[in-house]
Image: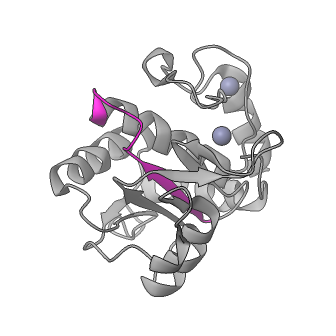
């Protein structure tokens, strides 16, 4: 998941900072959540609330759209995450948003060093303006775990790489259920965010 990383974080954080000012247009959306397929509305609403509190940014929750069929990987019966992001961005007309997180209940996968098709929680460009998060592998505590997955991918979009601090949002899950142990961006990641803004 070490992908397209660097400039968007700057834009993203700059936008967040700008958005704190009451003299700016507070309603301008910074992060868009785009549910795909049958993603539960209540889960999406809870996620929007959690992100708003954590990031102090405007969050817009878009009406659900169909999953991009062309991203479906028939042999493994799941969706290729990178293709899903690219196609969903075109089909849902979300290209104008700084960060768009596509949400699905379906399993998503990606190629890594060891596996051609590895099931994942989410994927985010590093840097970039697109990410996908799936609830398929979360099993329980869905709202809390999904929030951790999404804020991790938003961190990638902003330019942050993976982090080895055990409780940092940017820790690499390596396919394991680590979300319950993550509590915040660590100080090193916070400093990187500040550095990337300069
Ligand atoms: Zn990651
Ligand atoms: Zn960190």
From this view, report whether residue 134 is shown above or below residue 72. Answer: above
Residue 175 falls left or right of residue 79: right
Residue 11 falls left or right of residue 79: right
From this view, report whether residue 105 is shown above or below residue 184. Answer: below
Say if residue 165 shows up in the picture.
yes
Residues drawn in magenta: 129-142
Q: Position of residue 188 (x, y in %)?
A: 73, 24
Q: Position of residue 84 (x, y in %)?
A: 54, 69
Say how many tags the image has. 0
Residue 136 lies within the magenta run: yes
Give me the residue at 26% from left, 53% from top: 44
Q: Nearer the viewer, residue 15 or 51?
A: 51
Q: What's the image's color scheme? A: one colour
Give me the residue at 42% from left, 37% from top: 137
Q: Residue furthest left?
A: 42
Q: Residue furthest right?
A: 113
Q: Quadrant of ligand 2?
A: top right
Q: Position of residue 64 (x, y in %)?
A: 27, 72
Quarter assignment of residue 102: bottom left
From this view, report whether residue 95 is shown above or below residue 179. Answer: below
Say if residue 96 shows up in the picture.
no
Give me the residue at 24% from left, 63% from top: 38
Give me the residue at 54% from left, 55% from top: 76
From this view, report whether residue 128 is shown above or below residue 107. Answer: below
Q: Nearer the viewer, residue 90 or 163?
A: 90
Q: Nearer the viewer, residue 106 or 98?
A: 106
Residue 126 falls left or right of residue 130: right
Residue 108 lies within the magenta run: no
């Amino acid at each position: 998941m070490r992908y397209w990383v660097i400039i968007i974080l700057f834009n993203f954080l700059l936008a967040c900072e700008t958005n704190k000012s009451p003299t700016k247009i507070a309603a301008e959306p910074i992060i868009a959540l785009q549910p795909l397929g049958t993603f539960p509305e209540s889960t999406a609403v809870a996620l929007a609330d959690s992100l708003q509190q954590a990031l102090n940014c405007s969050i817009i929750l878009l009406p659900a759209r169909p999953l991009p069929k062309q991203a479906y990987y028939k042999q493994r019966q799941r969706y290729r995450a990178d293709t899903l992001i690219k196609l969903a961005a075109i089909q849902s007309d979300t290209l104008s948003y700084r960060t768009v997180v596509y949400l699905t209940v379906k399993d998503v996968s990606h190629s890594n060093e060891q596996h051609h098709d590895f099931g994942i929680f989410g994927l985010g460009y590093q840097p970039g303006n697109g990410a996908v998060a799936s609830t398929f592998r979360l099993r329980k505590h869905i709202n809390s775990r999904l929030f951790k997955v999404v804020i991790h991918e938003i961190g990638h979009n902003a330019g942050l790489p993976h982090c080895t601090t055990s409780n940092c949002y940017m820790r690499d899950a390596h396919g394991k259920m680590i979300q319950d142990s993550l509590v915040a961006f660590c100080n090193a990641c916070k400093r990187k965010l500040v550095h990337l803004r300069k």
